[in-house]
Image (cartoon, grey):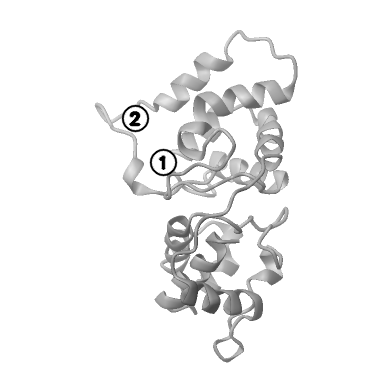
Amino acid sequence: MPQDSPSHKPRTQGGRRPYHAVLMLGLVLSGSVWADDAEKARTIVAKICAACHGMDGNGTAPNFPKLAGRHPEYLVRELKEFSSGKRKSEIMGPIATALDPDDYKALGAYFGGQKPTSGQVLDTAAAASGKQLYQDGNESKGIPACGGCHEADGSGNKRFPRLAGQHREYLIAQMYNFKKDVRSDASSRLMREVAKLLSDDEIKAVAEFLTGL
Protein backbone atom coordinates (compact mmCIF):
# COMPACT_ATOMS: atom_id res chain seq x y z
CA MET A 1 0.00 0.00 0.00
CA PRO A 2 2.37 2.67 -1.28
CA GLN A 3 2.31 6.13 0.15
CA ASP A 4 5.03 8.76 0.13
CA SER A 5 3.16 11.97 0.75
CA PRO A 6 4.93 14.16 3.35
CA SER A 7 1.71 16.02 4.08
CA HIS A 8 0.29 13.18 6.17
CA LYS A 9 3.17 12.52 8.56
CA PRO A 10 2.15 11.33 12.01
CA ARG A 11 2.54 13.79 14.85
CA THR A 12 5.42 13.34 17.23
CA GLN A 13 5.27 13.45 20.99
CA GLY A 14 8.41 13.38 23.10
CA GLY A 15 10.46 12.08 20.17
CA ARG A 16 8.16 9.09 19.63
CA ARG A 17 5.58 8.70 16.90
CA PRO A 18 2.27 7.33 18.24
CA TYR A 19 1.23 5.60 15.03
CA HIS A 20 -2.51 5.39 15.59
CA ALA A 21 -2.91 3.05 12.65
CA VAL A 22 -0.47 0.59 14.20
CA LEU A 23 -2.21 0.76 17.56
CA MET A 24 -5.56 0.18 15.90
CA LEU A 25 -4.10 -2.76 14.03
CA GLY A 26 -3.03 -4.40 17.27
CA LEU A 27 -6.50 -3.99 18.73
CA VAL A 28 -8.13 -5.42 15.64
CA LEU A 29 -5.95 -8.49 15.40
CA SER A 30 -5.43 -9.43 19.04
CA GLY A 31 -7.40 -12.36 20.38
CA SER A 32 -9.56 -12.79 17.29
CA VAL A 33 -10.48 -15.96 15.47
CA TRP A 34 -10.84 -15.69 11.70
CA ALA A 35 -12.90 -17.89 9.44
CA ASP A 36 -10.50 -17.37 6.54
CA ASP A 37 -7.82 -15.08 5.17
CA ALA A 38 -10.36 -13.12 3.14
CA GLU A 39 -12.32 -12.21 6.25
CA LYS A 40 -9.16 -11.16 8.05
CA ALA A 41 -8.04 -9.09 5.07
CA ARG A 42 -11.39 -7.29 4.90
CA THR A 43 -11.15 -6.42 8.59
CA ILE A 44 -7.59 -5.12 8.28
CA VAL A 45 -8.60 -3.04 5.26
CA ALA A 46 -11.64 -1.62 7.05
CA LYS A 47 -9.66 -0.61 10.13
CA ILE A 48 -6.34 0.43 8.60
CA CYS A 49 -6.20 0.75 4.82
CA ALA A 50 -9.60 2.19 3.85
CA ALA A 51 -8.99 5.64 5.33
CA CYS A 52 -6.36 6.33 2.66
CA HIS A 53 -6.97 3.78 -0.10
CA GLY A 54 -10.73 3.20 0.11
CA MET A 55 -12.47 0.00 1.11
CA ASP A 56 -12.42 -1.16 -2.51
CA GLY A 57 -8.93 0.16 -3.22
CA ASN A 58 -10.28 3.10 -5.24
CA GLY A 59 -9.71 5.84 -2.68
CA THR A 60 -10.49 9.40 -3.70
CA ALA A 61 -7.60 11.18 -1.95
CA PRO A 62 -5.31 12.10 -4.86
CA ASN A 63 -2.07 11.83 -2.87
CA PHE A 64 -2.74 8.19 -1.95
CA PRO A 65 -2.59 5.55 -4.70
CA LYS A 66 -5.44 3.40 -5.87
CA LEU A 67 -4.67 -0.25 -5.15
CA ALA A 68 -7.64 -1.95 -6.83
CA GLY A 69 -6.62 -4.33 -9.58
CA ARG A 70 -2.91 -4.33 -8.82
CA HIS A 71 -1.22 -7.70 -9.18
CA PRO A 72 -1.26 -9.50 -5.80
CA GLU A 73 2.43 -10.42 -6.04
CA TYR A 74 3.35 -6.79 -6.67
CA LEU A 75 1.41 -5.66 -3.60
CA VAL A 76 3.06 -8.34 -1.45
CA ARG A 77 6.50 -7.23 -2.61
CA GLU A 78 5.69 -3.61 -1.77
CA LEU A 79 4.62 -4.53 1.76
CA LYS A 80 7.84 -6.48 2.23
CA GLU A 81 9.91 -3.54 1.00
CA PHE A 82 8.11 -1.12 3.31
CA SER A 83 8.63 -3.49 6.23
CA SER A 84 12.33 -4.05 5.52
CA GLY A 85 12.99 -0.35 4.92
CA LYS A 86 14.07 -0.89 1.31
CA ARG A 87 11.27 1.52 0.41
CA LYS A 88 11.00 4.44 2.79
CA SER A 89 7.68 5.71 4.14
CA GLU A 90 6.98 7.07 7.60
CA ILE A 91 3.38 5.87 7.28
CA MET A 92 3.59 2.58 5.42
CA GLY A 93 6.82 1.41 7.06
CA PRO A 94 5.38 1.02 10.59
CA ILE A 95 2.08 -0.37 9.31
CA ALA A 96 3.76 -3.04 7.16
CA THR A 97 6.08 -3.94 10.05
CA ALA A 98 3.15 -4.31 12.46
CA LEU A 99 1.31 -6.64 10.11
CA ASP A 100 1.89 -10.36 10.26
CA PRO A 101 3.87 -11.17 7.07
CA ASP A 102 1.51 -14.10 6.55
CA ASP A 103 -1.25 -11.54 5.97
CA TYR A 104 0.53 -9.83 3.07
CA LYS A 105 -0.71 -12.45 0.62
CA ALA A 106 -4.31 -12.09 1.85
CA LEU A 107 -4.17 -8.31 1.45
CA GLY A 108 -2.62 -8.64 -1.99
CA ALA A 109 -5.40 -10.99 -3.05
CA TYR A 110 -8.04 -8.68 -1.57
CA PHE A 111 -6.94 -5.53 -3.37
CA GLY A 112 -5.97 -7.43 -6.51
CA GLY A 113 -9.51 -8.76 -6.71
CA GLN A 114 -11.19 -5.36 -6.50
CA LYS A 115 -12.53 -3.73 -9.65
CA PRO A 116 -10.47 -0.63 -10.54
CA THR A 117 -12.05 2.64 -11.59
CA SER A 118 -10.77 5.32 -13.93
CA GLY A 119 -10.50 9.05 -13.46
CA GLN A 120 -11.72 11.92 -15.61
CA VAL A 121 -9.50 13.41 -18.30
CA LEU A 122 -9.34 17.18 -17.90
CA ASP A 123 -6.94 18.02 -20.74
CA THR A 124 -7.66 16.02 -23.91
CA ALA A 125 -4.70 17.46 -25.81
CA ALA A 126 -2.28 16.49 -23.06
CA ALA A 127 -3.85 13.04 -22.81
CA ALA A 128 -3.36 12.49 -26.54
CA SER A 129 0.29 13.47 -26.25
CA GLY A 130 0.69 11.25 -23.23
CA LYS A 131 -0.91 8.32 -25.03
CA GLN A 132 1.65 8.52 -27.83
CA LEU A 133 4.52 8.67 -25.35
CA TYR A 134 3.11 5.79 -23.31
CA GLN A 135 2.62 3.59 -26.34
CA ASP A 136 5.65 4.52 -28.45
CA GLY A 137 8.15 6.23 -26.16
CA ASN A 138 10.49 8.85 -27.61
CA GLU A 139 13.37 7.27 -29.49
CA SER A 140 15.21 10.55 -30.00
CA LYS A 141 15.45 11.04 -26.23
CA GLY A 142 16.00 7.38 -25.41
CA ILE A 143 12.63 7.06 -23.63
CA PRO A 144 11.14 3.56 -23.91
CA ALA A 145 7.44 2.90 -24.32
CA CYS A 146 5.82 2.71 -20.87
CA GLY A 147 3.60 -0.13 -22.01
CA GLY A 148 6.64 -2.37 -22.39
CA CYS A 149 6.71 -2.78 -18.61
CA HIS A 150 3.25 -1.71 -17.44
CA GLU A 151 1.34 -3.48 -20.24
CA ALA A 152 -0.34 -1.82 -23.22
CA ASP A 153 -3.54 -1.22 -21.27
CA GLY A 154 -1.73 -0.02 -18.14
CA SER A 155 -2.90 -3.04 -16.13
CA GLY A 156 0.57 -3.85 -14.80
CA ASN A 157 1.86 -7.25 -13.71
CA LYS A 158 3.72 -8.88 -10.83
CA ARG A 159 6.87 -6.83 -11.49
CA PHE A 160 5.41 -3.44 -12.44
CA PRO A 161 2.37 -1.67 -10.95
CA ARG A 162 -0.97 -0.99 -12.52
CA LEU A 163 -1.10 2.62 -13.76
CA ALA A 164 -4.45 2.71 -15.56
CA GLY A 165 -6.96 4.89 -13.74
CA GLN A 166 -4.45 6.06 -11.13
CA HIS A 167 -4.76 9.57 -9.67
CA ARG A 168 -2.88 12.00 -11.89
CA GLU A 169 -1.60 13.85 -8.83
CA TYR A 170 -0.12 10.68 -7.37
CA LEU A 171 1.45 9.70 -10.70
CA ILE A 172 3.02 13.13 -11.14
CA ALA A 173 4.35 13.17 -7.57
CA GLN A 174 5.91 9.73 -7.95
CA MET A 175 7.53 10.63 -11.26
CA TYR A 176 9.16 13.63 -9.62
CA ASN A 177 10.25 11.41 -6.73
CA PHE A 178 11.95 9.15 -9.25
CA LYS A 179 13.42 12.09 -11.12
CA LYS A 180 14.89 13.64 -7.97
CA ASP A 181 16.04 10.31 -6.48
CA VAL A 182 13.60 10.61 -3.59
CA ARG A 183 12.50 7.11 -4.54
CA SER A 184 15.79 5.27 -4.31
CA ASP A 185 14.66 1.70 -3.59
CA ALA A 186 16.41 -0.93 -5.68
CA SER A 187 13.27 -1.83 -7.63
CA SER A 188 12.90 1.76 -8.88
CA ARG A 189 16.27 2.00 -10.66
CA LEU A 190 14.77 1.81 -14.15
CA MET A 191 12.11 4.39 -13.35
CA ARG A 192 14.71 6.82 -12.01
CA GLU A 193 16.57 6.58 -15.31
CA VAL A 194 13.42 7.08 -17.38
CA ALA A 195 12.02 9.92 -15.27
CA LYS A 196 15.20 11.95 -15.67
CA LEU A 197 14.67 11.93 -19.43
CA LEU A 198 11.11 13.26 -19.19
CA SER A 199 10.23 16.93 -19.28
CA ASP A 200 7.67 18.40 -16.89
CA ASP A 201 5.13 18.59 -19.72
CA GLU A 202 5.74 14.94 -20.68
CA ILE A 203 5.25 13.78 -17.09
CA LYS A 204 1.95 15.65 -16.86
CA ALA A 205 0.82 14.38 -20.26
CA VAL A 206 1.45 10.72 -19.45
CA ALA A 207 -0.31 11.13 -16.10
CA GLU A 208 -3.30 12.74 -17.82
CA PHE A 209 -3.55 9.86 -20.25
CA LEU A 210 -3.20 7.19 -17.58
CA THR A 211 -5.80 8.62 -15.22
CA GLY A 212 -8.43 8.22 -17.94
CA LEU A 213 -7.60 4.61 -18.83
In which quadrant of the rendered view does residue 164 lie?
A: bottom right
Find the residue positioned furthest to the bottom.
140
Please name the residue shown 63% across and 71% down the image. 146
Residue 130 lies left or right of residue 5; in this view the side is: right
Which residue in the protein does label 2 denote?
Answer: 17
In which quadrant of the rendered view does residue 61 lie?
A: top left
Question: 97 or 126: which is nearer to us?
Answer: 126
Please name the residue shown 70% across and 31% down the image. 106
Q: Which mark is residue 90?
A: 1
Asked if labels 1 and 2 touch by Cβ distance under 8 angstroms, the answer is: yes
Question: 50 or 88: which is nearer to us?
Answer: 50
User: What quarter of the picture does the C terminus occupy?
Assistant: bottom right
Q: Where is residue 108 drawn, in percent x and y?
A: 68, 38
Q: Where is residue 69 drawn, in percent x and y?
A: 67, 47
Q: Is residue 135 visible?
A: yes
Q: Is residue 182 visible?
A: no
Q: Is residue 110 above or below residue 116?
A: above
User: What quarter of the picture does the N terminus occupy?
Assistant: top right
